[in-house]
Image (tube, rainbow, N blue to C red):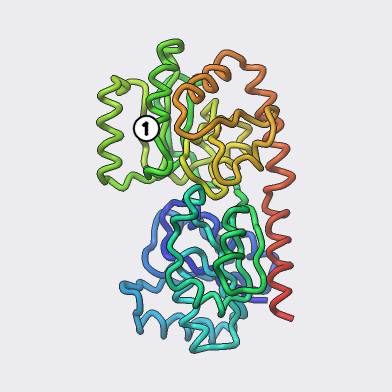
Amino acid sequence: MKVLQLVDSLDVGGTERVAVNTANALSNRIDKSYLCATRKEGILKDSISDNVEYLFLDKNRRIDFKAIKKLKTFIRVNEIDLIHAHSSSFFLAVLIKLLYPKVKIIWHDHYGNSEFINHRKSGVLPVTSRFFSHVLSVNTKLKVWAETKLNCNYIDYLPNFALPDNNKPVTRLSGEAGMRIIHLANLRPQKDHKTLLKAFKEVIKVYPDWTLHCVGKDFEDEYSKSLKFLVSELQLNSSVYFYGSKQDISNILKTCDIGVLSSKSEGLPIALLEYGFAKLPVVVTNVGDCIKVVSSLKEGLLINKEDIGALKEAIIKYISDKRLRTQNAIRLFEKVTESYSETAVVNKLITIYKLHLK
């Protein structure tokens, strides 16, 4: 069994991390694991295992004949059986299959705005899905959407999984140890940093020594500028810190005390799983499949999206009750270890691969 993970970039994001994690996890479980970045390299390139063979296409337009030829040759020469295409890379995978019919395609849908799935434009997906052997959806809403919109006989829900990184600790967080809140998310509107900032403003009126640490890619766009302006407007400059993309996530999480996700929409956020593996108590909005991870009050505090008051109260509840933080962190760790570990998810994935390679 030889499998290629196909992804558009290696920037830090949920889709990209799943692609890299999957390639790495498969590297000692199948004959050969490959990973191809089609358009852009990024910080995650350094996280690819030495046992994974890597290819970069440098594709710069939708139909790039040079890139198509390069990928087809790579697949043929290495006798790759299956392309596991993540998100928008499906289109290139289908072009390859038209030229090299023996290769199979698994499409992995990581669509992050599942709360607004009714507004999703399917585009060419219904037509190209005829060439998919299997569709994998990162939450149940996406699975239902695929069953309704796509032309594929095999559609399954496959949860994300997280792997602790082994990167050298390099990031030093500001603020006092024992009083840090982490928000691990790229600076995108769907992550709703604004609600978090407004809630945190209320938190520090009661607990002024606590600090908020935002780790994730800064696209330096209008949304980013609006966040920086809001921090100044709320006079949070000495309490809120932005770090951009970082590789040593495991190290960062070890130095924090509460994990927060304030998203308007999610699939199944890897950050939530990483909080669990790091034994952090979590406050998370009830979007996507977050409720499957935090399914009871013993596993974390689940609140409605865009609710400043509820977010403030949840954070204060944790700050004021260290015992509750410890208990919830342990329960969440047990949950993600059992249900969202590398072994549990990858074993299911290999079973799916085998189904189509008989």
Q: Residue at x 72, y 73 (%)?
A: 354
Q: Nearer the viewer, residue 78 or 5?
A: 5
Tell me residue 289's x, y (percent).
60, 45
* Residue annotated with mark 1: 194
Secondary structure at numbered mark 1: helix
Q: Is residue 292 above or below residue 298?
A: below
Question: How many discs mark residues in the rendered view?
Answer: 1
User: Image quadrant of residue 56?
Assistant: bottom left
Q: Residue at x 54, y 86 (%)?
A: 77
Q: Please state, as top left, top right, bottom left or bottom right, where the N terminus lies in the image.
A: bottom right
Q: Please state, as top left, top right, bottom left or bottom right, where the C terminus lies in the image.
A: bottom right
Q: Residue at x 30, y 21 (%)?
A: 234
Q: Residues within 10 Å of mark 1 (few under 14, many from 20)?
A: some
Q: Nearer the viewer, residue 137 or 46?
A: 137
Tell me residue 150's x, y (percent).
56, 70
Tell me residue 230's x, y (percent).
28, 29
Tell me residue 143's x, y (percent).
61, 59
Q: Residue at x 52, y 84 (%)?
A: 97
The amino acid type found where label 1 is placed reads Lys
Q: Is residue 328 above or below residue 5?
A: above
Query: Is 110 positioned to the left or the right of 245 in the image?
Result: right
